[in-house]
């Protein structure tokens, strides 16, 4: 394990669904970052980035939530976000949301120190080998926000490449949306489901035992469909794999 | 205010607000790709590579023709050209052809010794429609894309190169241009400001993929395109 | 007003359940993707070419008044009549006038999305003229009395069997499973139409300001015949089609072909700069160019989304869109479908009527990533949502987000909500997947994860 020469205080942003439904993802991140020698700061009062309101067009309501995030993270050294989608919200969409407001500069400052988890490990810390072992065939799903808003294609793969006994089999439609899309999944359930079916079929065709991603929201969609189809393929967050030894 | 002035007024009013340059938006378009500045100069630097020598360019033209299902022949003498034309005539059983006057088409028509529908001046379109082949000259061949550049002046009008089922192009080696920028440069230097009313880059025989995305040649235009280059 | 949304939802439910239809579209577009990637790879630098194309269109659109007047002046200098139309109705009247003046009976048409936009065929047929679509795909959908399914591949949703049946019924041809034979049936049926048509109507892919020419891209040769044989030629185009210079085509033609159809260059890329000129042997006696606004200037007045006018109608965003690929082209019920249609239709036909298309997106951004002129498509969907919520907010939604903000900003309230979720979980099992289920939208097709006893925050506190 290569250790960073400088130890940081990392502020962890745990969005509501990770807190409530996927605590293991956050716990794994804490373990991994602490093992690397860094100090974790978890602002308990931050649970939402404001994306649902933002994506629905209710920017004023979104700002009510986001302003608190901005204030609370103002002095953070580095912010690691436990979801590519929320990461895109903080890093890419806050500057839009707060454009032409007194908070515009704050939003830009925050954006510059926000990282999605895999990006933080591989690019900010320069660490890819975490000594993890995961004896299984896996395939990786690129969450759209992480992939296209944040431009994170390589970090997750670099990290997976160093996991012992893990075999990564790329699926044909790795970059195709799983159909979650936040409120979209509830507003247009049939379209969302059709998209999810394409994703599941593509993943299934690889023969992998696990579908890995760095976004729990995508995995909720995929796992929800797999369970309904009684498909034995499992989903798992990247951080959970990296925390295994 | 007439329609023209009304539209222009709305445009000018709209343009009083300025829009950001492409890629200016924060997380903006193509965030996935690194920001690139195209830099000055012609499109040549981004388009597919074309070699510098005549041999490389002709090889590229040949390869493109094969992919496009164009029949391309590089010939050394007028005799070879005449022989090939006669072969084509006999194999396909041409009864009549369409053509226009030109230093390559003229002798070709004489060699073929068939009735010719000439499209130098006004002509009967029904006559042209009955022709088995249209023989034309061209302005240029383009190595990069395997295209033939024709205009209403160089190739006997608009219909001759598209109405008959077989389009035969007679060209000269020195007409081979490297790429698309060179083709448009030629159009400008050769014709500006007195442009012909029609010009076309012909890239392979007519085709369609409208039925189950399966390629079929000869949708409405020629089913065959033959390029004979001297 | 609501009927557009309801129709959209009904149609999308219908198509998503038709597996055969989805398969047909995915297969066709899968083939396209392979070809597109191959042709893209041949470029020395595709990203730089995209940026250059985007900047060229930016220049064209942001100096549109200048370029349009240059374009018109140069066309007029060679004897073309240039018409300007603020609305669809004006454009239809202009074209009907030209057709009547020329004492035409039959009209041959090559593919033009602007003609679809102004429902030109209906108007011409209503006035008693015969209009025949000459592009094979368009001809097929015209025979079916349908709108094009896709802006580049109009008959993509049909199998050869369906086309064979259609031709047998409408043209009396013998049934065949061969795409080649089917194409030849159409070829034969249309040949005489070109020769006898009095008027030819085309669209345009580009309008070159520098030389006063329009550029038409096609594979079949139908547009070339339409522009060669009839005595009168009319080109209908949107005012946004402008490119400043002739040499811009050296970049735009191969990019359009690559992005649109996975071809290095489309079979015919033709320039038209006027009627038959002195010394020329054929071509129309009259050439009319109709420039259409139809609320494009309204989009131009929105600097945030002005780049949507950069669109070259290649269809690449439709091809990669997972929504399009699963609901198909007709579900949109718009002239322009897919991501670009979802962005511009609210501007062209009213935000409140068409906002649902902007919501019917997972915002995955595949469209923006693929667009050859770098239109910020999926972010424009977000802006349409914001604009519609600002203009006419839904009370329930606004209230929901207001309440959510209250909860999210108050840790104690949030803790109570979490506890409730856990408590109600066993009860949820009773109604799961049924209409009584408050999460029915999710659970009718998907399971929900089990909420664990300990949240992340609970765990964090055990460490303190």
Image (cartoon, rainbow, N blue to C red):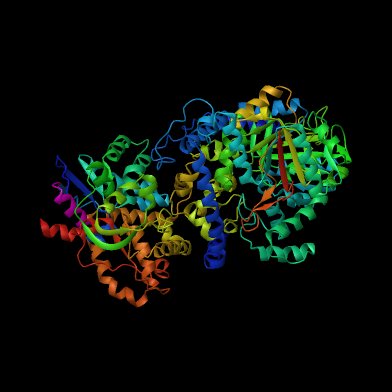
Judged from this view, the residue extending furthest toward the bottom is C430
Residue B170 vs C23, above or below: the answer is: above
The residue stretch that appears in magenta: A25-38
Main SS class of the magenta portion in the image? helix
Give left or right: position of B182 versus C80. Answer: left
Give left or right: position of C386 versus B199. Answer: left
Could you say which quadrant of the image residue A97 lies in?
Answer: top left
Residue positioned 76% across, 45% down in the render = B166
Which quarter of the figure is the C terminus of chain A placed in? bottom left
Foreground residue, C385 or C455?
Answer: C455
**Visible residue check, residue B53:** yes
The location of residue A53, given as percent across then percent down, is: 37, 52
Foreground residue, C131 or A51?
Answer: C131
Give left or right: position of A194 versus C152. Answer: left
The location of residue C218, given as percent across then percent down, is: 67, 44
Residue positioned 42% across, 66% down in the render = C441
Residue A219 vs C49, above or below: the answer is: below
The location of residue C17, given as percent across then percent down, is: 52, 68
Residue A229 part of the magenta segment: no
């Amino acid at each position: 394990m290569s250790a960073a020469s400088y130890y940081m205080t990392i502020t962890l942003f745990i969005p509501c669904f990770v807190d409530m439904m996927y605590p293991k993802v956050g716990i794994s991140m804490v373990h991994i970052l602490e093992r690397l020698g860094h100090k974790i700061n978890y602002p308990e009062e931050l649970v939402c980035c404001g994306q649902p309101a933002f994506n629905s067009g209710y920017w004023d309501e979104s700002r009510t939530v986001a302003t608190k995030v901005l204030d609370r993270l103002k002095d953070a050294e580095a912010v690691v976000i436990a979801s590519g989608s929320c990461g895109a919200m903080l890093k890419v969409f806050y500057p839009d949301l707060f454009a032409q407001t007194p908070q515009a500069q704050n939003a830009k400052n925050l954006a510059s120190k926000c990282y999605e988890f895999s990006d933080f490990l591989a690019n900010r810390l320069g660490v890819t080998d975490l000594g993890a072992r995961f004896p299984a065939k896996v395939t990786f799903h690129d969450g759209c926000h992480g992939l296209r808003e944040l431009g994170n294609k390589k970090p997750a793969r670099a990290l997976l490449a160093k996991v012992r006994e893990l075999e990564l089999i790329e699926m044909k439609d790795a970059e195709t949306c799983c159909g979650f899309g936040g409120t979209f999944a509830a507003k247009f359930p049939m379209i969302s489901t059709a998209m999810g079916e394409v994703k599941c079929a593509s993943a299934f065709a690889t023969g992998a035992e696990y579908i890995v991603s760095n976004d729990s929201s995508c995995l909720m969609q995929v796992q929800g469909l797999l369970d309904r189809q009684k498909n034995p393929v499992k989903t798992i967050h990247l951080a959970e794999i990296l925390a295994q030894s | 205010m007439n329609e023209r002035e009304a539209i222009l007024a709305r445009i000018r009013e709209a343009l009083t607000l300025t829009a950001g340059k492409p890629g200016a938006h924060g997380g903006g378009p193509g965030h996935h790709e690194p920001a690139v500045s195209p830099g000055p100069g012609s499109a040549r630097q981004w388009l597919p590579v074309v070699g510098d020598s005549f041999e490389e360019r002709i090889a590229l033209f040949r390869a493109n023709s094969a992919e496009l299902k164009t029949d391309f022949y590089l010939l050394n003498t007028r005799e070879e050209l005449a022989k090939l034309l006669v072969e084509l005539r006999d194999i396909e059983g041409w009864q009549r052809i369409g053509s226009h006057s030109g230093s390559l088409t003229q002798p070709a028509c004489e060699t073929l010794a068939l009735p010719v529908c000439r499209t130098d001046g006004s002509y009967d379109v029904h006559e042209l429609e009955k022709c088995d082949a249209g023989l034309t000259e061209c302005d240029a061949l383009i190595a990069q894309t395997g295209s033939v550049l024709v205009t209403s002046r160089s190739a006997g009008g608009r219909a001759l190169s598209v109405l008959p089922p077989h389009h035969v192009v007679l060209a000269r080696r020195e007409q081979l241009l490297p790429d698309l920028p060179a083709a448009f440069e030629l159009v400008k230097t050769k014709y500006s400001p007195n442009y012909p009313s029609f010009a076309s880059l012909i890239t392979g025989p007519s085709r369609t993929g409208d039925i189950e995305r399966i390629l079929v040649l000869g949708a409405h235009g020629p089913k065959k395109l033959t390029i004979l280059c001297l | 007003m609501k009927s557009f949304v309801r129709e959209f939802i009904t149609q999308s439910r219908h198509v998503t359940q038709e597996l055969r239809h989805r398969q047909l579209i995915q297969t066709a577009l899968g083939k396209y993707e392979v070809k597109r990637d191959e042709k893209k790879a041949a470029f020395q630098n595709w990203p730089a070419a995209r940026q250059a194309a985007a900047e060229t269109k930016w220049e064209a659109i942001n100096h549109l008044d200048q370029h349009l007047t240059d374009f018109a002046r140069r066309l007029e200098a060679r004897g073309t009549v240039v018409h300007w139309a603020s609305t669809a109705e004006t454009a239809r009247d202009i074209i009907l006038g030209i057709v009547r003046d020329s004492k035409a009976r039959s009209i041959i048409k090559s593919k033009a999305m602007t003609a679809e936009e102004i429902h030109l065929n209906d108007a011409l047929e209503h006035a008693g003229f015969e209009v025949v679509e000459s592009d094979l795909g368009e001809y097929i959908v015209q025979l079916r009395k349908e709108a094009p399914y896709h802006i580049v591949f109009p008959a993509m949703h049909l199998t050869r069997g369906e086309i064979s049946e259609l031709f047998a019924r409408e043209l009396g041809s013998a049934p065949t499973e061969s795409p080649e034979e089917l194409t030849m049936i159409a070829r034969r049926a249309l040949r005489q139409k070109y020769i006898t048509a009095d008027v030819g109507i085309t669209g345009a892919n580009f309008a070159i300001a520098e030389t006063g020419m329009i550029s038409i891209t096609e594979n079949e040769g139908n547009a070339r015949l339409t522009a060669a044989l009839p005595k009168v030629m009319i080109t209908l185009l949107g005012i946004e089609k402008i490119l400043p210079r002739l040499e811009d085509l050296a970049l735009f033609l191969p990019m359009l072909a690559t992005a649109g159809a996975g071809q290095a260059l489309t079979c015919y890329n033709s320039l038209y700069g006027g009627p038959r000129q002195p010394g020329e042997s054929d071509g129309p006696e009259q050439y009319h160019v109709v420039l259409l606004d139809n609320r494009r200037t309204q989009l131009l007045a929105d600097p945030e989304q002005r780049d949507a006018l950069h669109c070259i109608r290649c269809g690449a965003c439709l091809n990669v869109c997972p929504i399009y690929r699963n609901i198909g082209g007709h579900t949109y019920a718009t002239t322009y479908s897919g991501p670009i249609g979802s962005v511009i239709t609210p501007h062209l036909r009213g935000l409140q009527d068409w906002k649902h298309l902007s919501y019917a997106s997972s915002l995955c951004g595949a469209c923006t990533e693929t667009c050859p002129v770098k239109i910020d498509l999926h972010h424009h969907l977000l802006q349409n949502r914001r604009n519609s919520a600002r203009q006419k907010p839904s009370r329930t939604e606004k209230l929901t987000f207001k309440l959510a903000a209250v909860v999210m900003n108050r840790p104690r309230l949030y803790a109570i909500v979490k506890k409730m979720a856990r408590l109600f979980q066993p009860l949820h099992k009773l109604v799961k997947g049924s209409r009584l289920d408050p999460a029915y939208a999710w659970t009718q097709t998907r399971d929900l994860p089990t909420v664990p006893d300990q949240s992340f925050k609970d765990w964090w506190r055990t460490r303190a």
